Image (tube, helix red, strand yellow):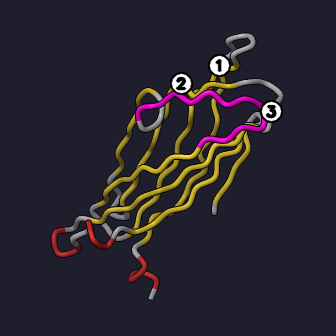
Amino acid sequence: MISKITEGVRVSIETNYQQEYSSPMQAHYVFTYRIQIENYSEQTVKLLRRHWFIYDSNGLMREVEGEGVVGQQPILEPGDSHEYVSGCNLKTEMGKMRGSYLMERLVDGKQFTVIIPEFMLIAPFKLN
């Protein structure tokens, strides 16, 4: 599991290769990732937006930006956590992702960026 804390908000990621949805013969590799967001700060925060950079090992990069995560803009009280699962597809058996969340402190409306640490997406057969 990869984790990073920014301004009291911890982001942890686990990844999985989805063999049943992938088709290596057609250069289609599907991965899921589980993200846990934990609020270790003393303020209630709200996740407003996400911003992703997704890289295939052939140099192709995609950028994805939008409101919330999987249709939600979770509010986390101090000590709360929020977990969700999402996915992406690559054209290669290896790649990586990194990004950020735009968060807001509800007490004063101050917005801040939480870093999503870079993590690898690797089909297990590539590790042999």
Q: Position of residue 88 (x, y in %)?
A: 35, 53
**Marked residue nearer the N-terminal end (3 or 1):** 3
Are the two marked residues, 2 and 1, in contact with CB atoms closer than 8 angstroms?
Answer: yes
> What is the secondary structure assignment of the residue under circle 1?
strand
Left or right, 80 with respect to 58, comes to right
Q: Closest to the observer: 100 or 58?
A: 100
> Residue drawn at (47%, 31%), measured in percent from left and top?
72
**Marked residue nearer the N-terminal end (2 or 1):** 2
Q: Residues within 10 Å of mark 2 (few under 14, many from 20)?
A: some
Q: Is residue 116 above or below residue 33?
A: above
Q: Amino acid at mark 3?
A: Ser
The N terminus: image quadrant? bottom right
Which residue range is magenta in the image?
Answer: 71-82
- Circle 2 is placed at which residue position? 48
Q: Closest to the observer: 80 or 59?
A: 80
Q: Position of residue 92 (x, y in %)?
A: 31, 67
Residue that extends furthest to the right in the rendered view of this protein:
42
Residue that extends furthest to the top in the rendered view of this protein:
108
> Residue drawn at (36%, 49%), measured in percent from left and top?
61
Helix, strand or loop for the magenta stretch, by majority: loop
Circle number at residue 41: 3
Q: Amino acid at mark 1?
A: Gln
Residue that extends furthest to the left in the rendered view of this protein:
26
Q: For residue 33: magenta?
A: no
> What is the secondary structure assignment of the residue under circle 2?
strand
Q: Position of residue 112 (x, y in %)?
A: 66, 24
- Circle 1 is placed at which residue position? 111
Q: Amino acid at mark 2?
A: Leu
